[in-house]
Amino acid sequence: MARRNFVPLLLQILLQPMLLVFIFGRVMTTSGYMPPQYKSLLLPGIMALSMLLSGIWAVAMPTISEFQFTKEIEDRLLAPIEIDWVAVEKLVSGSIQALIAGFVVLPSAWLLLGKGVALSLPHPGVLVLICLLIALLSSAVGLTLGCAVGQTNIGLMFSLVIAPMIFFGCTYYPWSALEKFPVLQKIVLINPVVYASEGLRASLVPQFPHLSVPAIFSALLFFNLTFVAVGLRLFRRKAIS
């Protein structure tokens, strides 16, 4: 099964990030519309975006399908284990796929951007911890959405929830770029994607402005605990009903 789905999975992980990298990081910088330094600023955001989308997609869509279309989830719920462990399996699976997405996109985007990408890794342990937190966050958000969204509202989930999270998640720009919009700059702090993007920016391109590392870790831990708890609760309620 894994071998058969390898090519579609690879395309799902790489296609959209590579298009964004090529247009914003290669075309816009080569033509002079963006400064060359933007390549380095963009790459961590693209990595965060890839991890979040992959994890959310890997958990939310199968959950919606299994509960509302194929009913495959019923066989797993009959297994002699607690219901929560079925949800935990989804969280682990989604987290692994998010990690794979991040570490596939990073070197691929780096090669596509060409010369001028100034990445550094002063604290590898910080990068690993942030990636683990982002991976778990993506799968937890996916579990929450998969259990909360009905089959007729899948399109709305992406247009009304995921799209605003991405565009106001500091993936294409640092949080400090919103200084001229002070109200918006404070509002976006409720968006977990902000801390994913800023965390990878602090780990890979610390020369650019970013939120403090303790604030990033605190926020990611808070959002992880919140979405895991809410996701497990919704999964349990949906399974029992």
Image: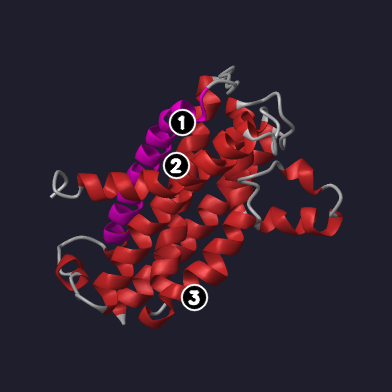
14 up-or-down from 185: above or below = above
> To which quarter of the image does residue 117 belong?
top right
Residue 156 — which label? Answer: 3
- Asked whether the viewer can see residue 209, the reply is yes
Q: Position of residue 11 (x, y in %)?
A: 31, 47
Residue 145, position as x, y percentages in the image: 44, 67
Picture quarter with the C terminus? bottom left
Q: Amino acid at mark 2?
A: Met
116 vs 156, left or right, is right
Disc nearest the viewer among 1 and 3: 1
Q: Residue 23 placed where, x, y %?
A: 54, 43
Amino acid type, callout 3: Leu
Q: Which residue is mark 1?
A: 112
Considering only order in the chain, which callout, 3 or 1, is on the residue closer to the N terminus?
1
The residue where tag 2 is placed is 18
Q: Residue at x 41, y 74 (%)?
A: 154
- Magenta stretch: give its range: 85-114
Q: Nearer the viewer, residue 67 or 49?
A: 49
